[in-house]
Amino acid sequence: MLLKKIEDYWTNRAQGYCEVNLKELNCYKRHAWTELIAEYCPKVDDRRLEVLDIGTGPGFFAIIMAEMGHHVTAVDYTSEMIEKAKNNAGKLNDRISFYKMDAHDIKFDDNTFDLIITRNLTWNLEDPEKAYASWYRVLKKGGVMLNFDANWYLHVHYEDKREEYEQDRLRSQIHMVEDHYVNTDTSAMEEIARNLPLSRIERPQWDSVKLLETGFNKVFVESGIGDKVWDDEEKINYRSTPMFLIGGIK
Protein backbone atom coordinates (compact mmCIF):
# COMPACT_ATOMS: atom_id res chain seq x y z
CA MET A 1 0.00 0.00 0.00
CA LEU A 2 2.82 2.42 0.86
CA LEU A 3 4.58 1.66 -2.44
CA LYS A 4 1.36 2.51 -4.28
CA LYS A 5 1.15 5.83 -2.43
CA ILE A 6 4.75 6.61 -3.39
CA GLU A 7 4.04 5.70 -7.01
CA ASP A 8 0.93 7.90 -7.06
CA TYR A 9 2.80 10.82 -5.52
CA TRP A 10 5.57 10.74 -8.13
CA THR A 11 3.08 10.18 -10.93
CA ASN A 12 1.36 13.41 -9.90
CA ARG A 13 4.71 15.20 -9.66
CA ALA A 14 6.06 13.88 -12.95
CA GLN A 15 5.39 17.00 -15.02
CA GLY A 16 6.76 19.45 -12.45
CA TYR A 17 9.78 17.28 -11.68
CA CYS A 18 10.42 16.91 -15.40
CA GLU A 19 10.48 20.69 -15.81
CA VAL A 20 13.02 20.98 -12.98
CA ASN A 21 15.25 18.34 -14.59
CA LEU A 22 15.07 20.00 -17.99
CA LYS A 23 16.18 23.30 -16.46
CA GLU A 24 19.16 21.49 -14.96
CA LEU A 25 20.02 19.93 -18.31
CA ASN A 26 19.89 23.33 -20.01
CA CYS A 27 22.27 25.19 -17.73
CA TYR A 28 25.74 24.87 -16.23
CA LYS A 29 24.59 22.02 -14.01
CA ARG A 30 24.79 19.57 -16.89
CA HIS A 31 28.55 20.13 -17.09
CA ALA A 32 28.95 20.25 -13.30
CA TRP A 33 27.28 16.86 -12.88
CA THR A 34 29.24 15.39 -15.80
CA GLU A 35 32.53 16.43 -14.21
CA LEU A 36 31.49 15.18 -10.78
CA ILE A 37 30.44 11.76 -12.05
CA ALA A 38 33.58 11.45 -14.19
CA GLU A 39 35.69 11.75 -11.00
CA TYR A 40 34.28 8.48 -9.70
CA CYS A 41 33.51 6.46 -12.86
CA PRO A 42 35.41 3.18 -13.30
CA LYS A 43 38.30 3.74 -15.68
CA VAL A 44 38.22 1.50 -18.75
CA ASP A 45 40.01 2.18 -22.05
CA ASP A 46 38.73 -0.53 -24.36
CA ARG A 47 34.95 -0.19 -24.11
CA ARG A 48 32.05 1.92 -22.96
CA LEU A 49 30.65 1.45 -19.47
CA GLU A 50 27.48 -0.46 -18.72
CA VAL A 51 25.56 1.95 -16.48
CA LEU A 52 22.45 1.33 -14.38
CA ASP A 53 20.48 4.46 -13.49
CA ILE A 54 18.07 3.54 -10.68
CA GLY A 55 15.10 5.84 -10.13
CA THR A 56 15.83 7.66 -13.37
CA GLY A 57 12.79 9.94 -13.05
CA PRO A 58 12.68 12.16 -16.14
CA GLY A 59 16.03 10.73 -17.27
CA PHE A 60 18.52 13.26 -15.91
CA PHE A 61 21.42 10.86 -15.22
CA ALA A 62 20.53 8.57 -18.11
CA ILE A 63 20.90 11.47 -20.55
CA ILE A 64 24.17 12.65 -19.02
CA MET A 65 25.71 9.17 -19.03
CA ALA A 66 24.58 8.48 -22.61
CA GLU A 67 26.12 11.78 -23.71
CA MET A 68 29.38 10.62 -22.10
CA GLY A 69 29.31 7.70 -24.54
CA HIS A 70 28.17 4.90 -22.24
CA HIS A 71 25.32 2.43 -22.59
CA VAL A 72 22.66 3.13 -19.98
CA THR A 73 19.94 0.96 -18.50
CA ALA A 74 17.47 3.26 -16.75
CA VAL A 75 14.75 2.03 -14.38
CA ASP A 76 11.93 3.70 -12.49
CA TYR A 77 8.81 2.43 -10.72
CA THR A 78 6.61 5.21 -12.13
CA SER A 79 5.41 4.70 -15.70
CA GLU A 80 4.81 8.42 -16.18
CA MET A 81 8.44 9.16 -15.30
CA ILE A 82 9.64 6.58 -17.83
CA GLU A 83 7.59 8.25 -20.57
CA LYS A 84 9.00 11.66 -19.64
CA ALA A 85 12.53 10.24 -19.69
CA LYS A 86 12.11 8.68 -23.12
CA ASN A 87 10.80 11.95 -24.50
CA ASN A 88 13.62 13.96 -22.90
CA ALA A 89 16.31 11.57 -24.18
CA GLY A 90 15.34 12.17 -27.81
CA LYS A 91 18.11 11.04 -30.14
CA LEU A 92 19.97 9.45 -27.22
CA ASN A 93 17.33 6.71 -26.93
CA ASP A 94 19.52 4.38 -28.97
CA ARG A 95 22.00 4.38 -26.06
CA ILE A 96 19.42 4.02 -23.28
CA SER A 97 17.18 1.08 -22.39
CA PHE A 98 14.22 2.00 -20.16
CA TYR A 99 12.39 -0.38 -17.83
CA LYS A 100 9.64 -0.05 -15.23
CA MET A 101 11.15 -1.72 -12.18
CA ASP A 102 11.13 -1.75 -8.39
CA ALA A 103 14.44 -0.45 -6.97
CA HIS A 104 14.21 -3.07 -4.22
CA ASP A 105 14.40 -5.94 -6.70
CA ILE A 106 16.54 -5.26 -9.76
CA LYS A 107 15.71 -7.84 -12.44
CA PHE A 108 19.07 -8.21 -14.15
CA ASP A 109 21.79 -10.84 -14.03
CA ASP A 110 24.56 -10.86 -11.44
CA ASN A 111 27.69 -8.84 -12.26
CA THR A 112 26.14 -6.91 -15.16
CA PHE A 113 26.98 -3.23 -14.56
CA ASP A 114 30.19 -1.23 -14.22
CA LEU A 115 28.44 1.74 -12.63
CA ILE A 116 25.23 2.21 -10.67
CA ILE A 117 24.07 5.77 -10.20
CA THR A 118 21.07 7.21 -8.41
CA ARG A 119 19.84 10.52 -7.00
CA ASN A 120 17.19 11.38 -4.40
CA LEU A 121 15.90 7.82 -4.33
CA THR A 122 16.99 5.86 -1.26
CA TRP A 123 15.09 8.05 1.21
CA ASN A 124 11.91 6.90 -0.64
CA LEU A 125 12.54 3.20 -0.07
CA GLU A 126 10.59 0.98 2.31
CA ASP A 127 13.54 -1.43 2.65
CA PRO A 128 16.82 0.27 1.70
CA GLU A 129 18.89 -2.67 2.95
CA LYS A 130 17.13 -4.98 0.50
CA ALA A 131 17.68 -2.46 -2.28
CA TYR A 132 21.40 -2.15 -1.53
CA ALA A 133 21.75 -5.95 -1.61
CA SER A 134 20.00 -6.07 -4.99
CA TRP A 135 22.22 -3.32 -6.39
CA TYR A 136 25.35 -5.02 -5.10
CA ARG A 137 24.36 -8.27 -6.80
CA VAL A 138 24.08 -6.74 -10.30
CA LEU A 139 27.31 -4.72 -9.96
CA LYS A 140 30.48 -6.16 -11.47
CA LYS A 141 33.53 -6.89 -9.35
CA GLY A 142 35.39 -3.58 -9.14
CA GLY A 143 32.22 -1.75 -10.16
CA VAL A 144 31.18 1.53 -8.53
CA MET A 145 27.90 2.64 -6.98
CA LEU A 146 27.23 6.39 -6.66
CA ASN A 147 24.24 7.38 -4.54
CA PHE A 148 23.44 11.11 -4.25
CA ASP A 149 20.88 11.86 -1.56
CA ALA A 150 20.05 13.99 1.50
CA ASN A 151 18.24 13.77 4.83
CA TRP A 152 15.12 15.16 3.19
CA TYR A 153 12.45 14.36 5.77
CA LEU A 154 14.05 14.10 9.19
CA HIS A 155 11.86 17.07 10.08
CA VAL A 156 8.73 14.88 10.21
CA HIS A 157 10.14 13.17 13.32
CA TYR A 158 12.50 15.64 15.00
CA GLU A 159 11.52 19.08 16.26
CA ASP A 160 14.98 20.61 15.82
CA LYS A 161 14.97 19.50 12.18
CA ARG A 162 11.47 20.95 11.75
CA GLU A 163 12.77 24.30 13.01
CA GLU A 164 15.66 24.18 10.54
CA TYR A 165 13.25 23.31 7.73
CA GLU A 166 10.99 26.24 8.64
CA GLN A 167 14.02 28.52 8.70
CA ASP A 168 14.76 27.47 5.13
CA ARG A 169 11.23 28.46 4.14
CA LEU A 170 11.65 31.85 5.85
CA ARG A 171 15.07 32.34 4.30
CA SER A 172 13.64 31.86 0.82
CA GLN A 173 11.22 34.72 1.52
CA ILE A 174 13.94 36.99 2.91
CA HIS A 175 16.14 36.41 -0.13
CA MET A 176 13.12 36.68 -2.44
CA VAL A 177 13.69 33.39 -4.20
CA GLU A 178 11.17 30.70 -5.09
CA ASP A 179 10.32 28.36 -2.23
CA HIS A 180 10.70 24.94 -3.83
CA TYR A 181 8.14 23.42 -1.46
CA VAL A 182 5.29 25.80 -2.32
CA ASN A 183 4.19 23.98 -5.48
CA THR A 184 4.55 20.46 -4.08
CA ASP A 185 2.07 18.46 -2.02
CA THR A 186 4.16 18.59 1.15
CA SER A 187 1.42 17.16 3.35
CA ALA A 188 1.13 14.04 1.16
CA MET A 189 4.87 13.52 1.06
CA GLU A 190 5.27 14.08 4.79
CA GLU A 191 2.56 11.50 5.46
CA ILE A 192 4.47 8.99 3.32
CA ALA A 193 7.84 9.94 4.83
CA ARG A 194 6.64 9.24 8.37
CA ASN A 195 6.42 5.57 7.40
CA LEU A 196 9.79 5.35 5.66
CA PRO A 197 12.78 4.12 7.70
CA LEU A 198 15.32 6.64 6.44
CA SER A 199 13.18 9.57 7.60
CA ARG A 200 14.27 8.64 11.13
CA ILE A 201 17.98 8.05 10.51
CA GLU A 202 20.86 10.49 10.20
CA ARG A 203 22.72 9.76 7.00
CA PRO A 204 25.09 8.93 5.34
CA GLN A 205 26.57 7.29 8.44
CA TRP A 206 23.91 4.59 8.35
CA ASP A 207 24.55 3.89 4.66
CA SER A 208 28.29 3.51 5.20
CA VAL A 209 27.73 0.72 7.72
CA LYS A 210 25.09 -1.04 5.62
CA LEU A 211 27.16 -0.95 2.44
CA LEU A 212 30.09 -2.60 4.21
CA GLU A 213 27.75 -5.20 5.69
CA THR A 214 26.32 -5.80 2.20
CA GLY A 215 29.79 -6.69 0.96
CA PHE A 216 31.22 -3.59 -0.67
CA ASN A 217 35.01 -3.69 -0.57
CA LYS A 218 35.36 0.07 -0.15
CA VAL A 219 32.90 2.76 0.94
CA PHE A 220 33.40 6.50 0.59
CA VAL A 221 31.47 9.67 1.43
CA GLU A 222 31.62 13.17 0.01
CA SER A 223 29.59 15.80 1.83
CA GLY A 224 28.64 19.18 0.47
CA ILE A 225 27.79 17.94 -3.03
CA GLY A 226 25.39 20.87 -3.29
CA ASP A 227 28.35 23.25 -3.33
CA LYS A 228 29.29 21.76 -6.69
CA VAL A 229 25.90 21.29 -8.36
CA TRP A 230 23.35 23.57 -6.68
CA ASP A 231 22.69 27.18 -7.58
CA ASP A 232 22.20 29.91 -4.95
CA GLU A 233 18.43 29.40 -4.89
CA GLU A 234 18.80 25.71 -4.09
CA LYS A 235 21.38 26.40 -1.42
CA ILE A 236 18.89 28.73 0.27
CA ASN A 237 16.02 26.25 -0.02
CA TYR A 238 17.98 23.22 1.15
CA ARG A 239 20.42 24.65 3.66
CA SER A 240 19.25 22.23 6.37
CA THR A 241 19.39 19.22 4.03
CA PRO A 242 22.78 19.26 2.27
CA MET A 243 23.25 16.74 -0.49
CA PHE A 244 25.86 14.02 0.05
CA LEU A 245 27.42 11.25 -2.00
CA ILE A 246 27.63 7.78 -0.51
CA GLY A 247 29.60 5.49 -2.78
CA GLY A 248 30.81 1.92 -2.81
CA ILE A 249 33.25 -0.21 -4.79
CA LYS A 250 32.53 -3.93 -5.09
Image (cartoon, grey):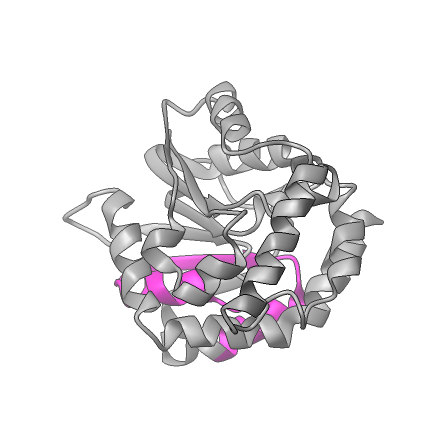
Does any portion of residue 222 appear in the rendered image?
A: yes
Residue 234 screen position, x and y as percent: 47, 62
Residue 66 screen position, x and y as percent: 33, 65
Does any portion of residue 82 appear in the rendered image?
A: no
The quarter of the picture where residue 180 lies is bottom right
Q: How many marks?
A: 0
145 vs 123, nearest the viewer: 123
Residue 96 screen position, x and y as percent: 42, 65
99 vs 159, nearest the viewer: 159
The quarter of the picture where residue 173 lies is bottom right
Residue 249 screen position, x and y as percent: 35, 31
* Residue depicted at 36% across the width and 45% down the height: 115
Q: Is residue 124 magenta?
A: no
* Residue depicted at 62% across the width and 60% down the height: 169
Judge left or right: residue 21 versus residue 45.
Answer: right
129 vs 157, nearest the viewer: 157
Task: Tell me which segment is drawn in magenta.
Answer: 58-87
Judge left or right: residue 111 versus residue 56.
Answer: left
- Considering every residue shown, the one lying at the far right of the view is 1
Q: Quadrant of the C terminus?
A: top left
- Considering every residue shown, the one lying at the far left of the view is 45
Judge left or right: residue 238 versus residue 66.
Answer: right
The quarter of the picture where residue 224 lies is top left
214 vs 10, nearest the viewer: 10
Q: Is residue 62 magenta?
A: yes
* Residue depicted at 33% across the width and 67% down the height: 30
Q: In the image, is residue 183 above or below residue 204? A: below
- Considering every residue shown, the one lying at the far front of the view is 174
